Image (cartoon, rainbow, N blue to C red):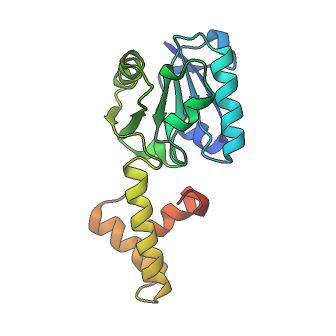
Amino acid sequence: MKKIFLTGDENIKEELRLKLKDCEYTDNLKDTNIAVECTNYPRGEKTDIIKQLDAELNPSMPILTSSLCVAVWEQAAVCKNPERLIGIGLYPTISKTKLIELAPSRLTNDETTEKVKKFFSEQKIECSVVPDVPGLVFPRIISMIINEAAQVYAEKTASREDIDTAMKLGTNYPYGPLEWTDKLGVGLI
């Protein structure tokens, strides 16, 4: 059983615990197989966490870092071992998805990417490797849909409930776009 160290945003950590059921969670960095940094902002806090993980973890252990608000290559600038840092799309509804986006930076080595892909495969979770850009793919598209829904609501074209119902029933989304806003938080959009 893999031992995981989670740090950062409590809501995202809880979502990951719901998603990664066949894992043991540890607070001991020396006793972990993989570390996941779940902070999207503030950036200074995120940087401090990355530095600590890089300094205290065995250099061969992968560090997964949320890369919704900042690219992995930028986060890697504070690491002595940037080759083991890989981005992951972490947001407050991750437990409901069937896919995890991974974003290796130009500094991430292939060994790290393969270890992380294998880890998620063992958890029966599909991975998609995407470019190292802030927001990745899925969250950027959801943000665009949310922004358009907000515009439709602001124009009084439809009620909040009608917008959410239309998208849930019309596209089979788990949430309507305005519901998603409430779950993600406006700051993340």
Residue 169 falls in which quadrant of the image?
Answer: bottom left
Q: Is residue 74 left or right of residue 175?
A: right
Q: Is residue 144 above or below residue 42?
A: below
How many numbered discs sit on the rendered protein? 0
Pick the residue in front: 43 or 184.
Answer: 43
Q: Position of residue 7 (x, y in %)?
A: 65, 31
Pick the residue in front: 10 or 67.
Answer: 67
Q: Is residue 152 above or below residue 75?
A: below
Residue 102 falls in which quadrant of the image?
Answer: top left
* Residue 9 seen in this snapshot: yes
Q: Is residue 137 left or right of residue 88?
A: left
Residue at point 41%, 46% (across, down): 136
Which residue in the rendered view is the most extreme toward the bottom? 156
Which residue in the rendered view is the most extreme toward the left? 170
Q: Position of residue 17 (x, y in %)?
A: 55, 32
Q: Position of residue 82 (x, y in %)?
A: 53, 23
Q: Is residue 189 above or below residue 67?
A: below
Q: Is residue 148 left or right of residue 54?
A: left
* Residue 176 seen in this snapshot: no
Residue at point 41%, 22% (across, down): 116
Residue at point 35%, 59% (across, down): 173
Q: Position of residue 94 (x, y in %)?
A: 47, 44
